């Protein structure tokens, strides 16, 4: 991902990105039912590195499997590239944790940009204090082994009903997490940046008491003229 694209995506909302995607016929790119552990933290932008869980089978998932250095969950934590976002397919099941505070701390210390699961994290009060953004469905104390087996690293997954392919661009804000197809990331980032400028203008005018009719969308010539003048005055 270009640094310019990353910088642009850090400053736009998932709502604006959803609109840009909808214009291209993409309707299901928002990861459903995940929330930031720290809503006041920074936004999250990075390329997807995925981990997929399947239903656990009891004879394969005793606590001793964590002693195996090749355990996929542990390997994924050590392989997720700096600047990437780890996206975990936990089958939308938060009854057992996708990971806990120690593994998420390791991701943070390795320079990973964020982590998201459609399941839950244990040690969530600790994770909420970390500098790295983290998103999940709800807190979950049981170890993942009780319900999940980590089975595949960096393959296509579904996370919260959104399709995620390795290398897709993941964007998170206080509202939620969105998946940008990699080949669209540059143009969507540029378009959303322009949309954000206009939306800031509209928000300001609405707060001043102006009607949305003819303003949003700008079907009146006066709205387009006012926006051009506002933009020049604001240096945007």
Image (tube, grey):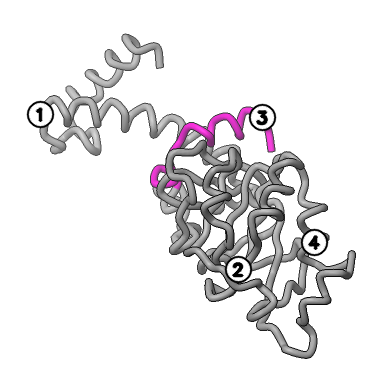
Indicate which disc, 4 or 3, sits on the residue closer to the N terminus: 3
Indicate which disc, 4 or 1, sits on the residue closer to the N terminus: 4
Q: Residue at x 50, y 52 (%)?
A: 177
- 72 sits to left or right of 161: right
Q: Quadrant of the C terminus?
A: top left
Observer-side mark, 3 or 2, equals 2
| Region rendered in magenta | 1-17
> What residue did someone put label 1 on?
209
Name the one closer to the observer, 220 or 74: 74
Residue 143's quadrant in the figure? Answer: bottom right
Q: Find out whether the residues at labels 4 and 1 contact each other: C-beta distance under 8 Å.
A: no
**Tag on residue 74?**
4
Residue 2's quadrant in the figure? Answer: top right
Q: Report the number of numbered marks.
A: 4
Q: CA distance from mark 4 to mark 1?
A: 55 Å
Q: Secondary structure at mark 1?
A: loop
Mark 2 neighbour density, 10 Å: few (under 14) some (14–19) many (20 or more): many
Q: CA distance from mark 1 to mark 3?
A: 38 Å
Residue 33's quadrant in the figure? Answer: bottom left
> What residue did someone put label 3 on?
3
Q: CA distance from mark 3 to mark 2?
A: 33 Å
């Amino acid at each position: 991902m270009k640094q310019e694209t990353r910088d642009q995506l850090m400053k736009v909302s998932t709502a604006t990105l959803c609109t840009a995607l909808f214009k291209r016929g993409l309707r299901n790119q928002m990861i459903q039912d995940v929330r930031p552990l720290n809503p006041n933290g920074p936004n999250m932008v990075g390329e997807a590195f995925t981990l997929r869980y399947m239903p656990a089978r009891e004879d394969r998932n005793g606590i001793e499997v964590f002693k195996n250095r090749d355990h996929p969950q542990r390997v994924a934590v050590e392989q997720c590239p700096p600047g990437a976002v780890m996206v975990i397919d936990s089958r939308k099941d938060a009854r057992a944790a996708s990971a806990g505070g120690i593994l998420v701390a390791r991701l943070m210390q390795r320079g990973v940009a964020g982590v998201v699961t459609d399941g839950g994290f244990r040690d969530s009060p600790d994770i909420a204090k970390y500098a790295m953004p983290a998103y999940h469905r709800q807190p979950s104390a049981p170890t993942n082994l009780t319900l999940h087996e980590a089975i595949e690293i960096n393959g296509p997954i579904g996370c919260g009903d959104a399709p995620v392919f390795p290398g897709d661009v993941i964007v998170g804000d206080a509202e939620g997490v969105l998946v940008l197809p990699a080949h669209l990331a540059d143009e969507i980032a540029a378009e959303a940046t322009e949309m954000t400028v206009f939306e800031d203008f509209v928000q300001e005018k609405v707060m001043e008491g102006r009607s949305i009719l003819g303003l949003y969308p700008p079907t009146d010539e006066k709205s387009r003229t006012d926006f051009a003048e506002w933009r020049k005055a604001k240096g945007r």
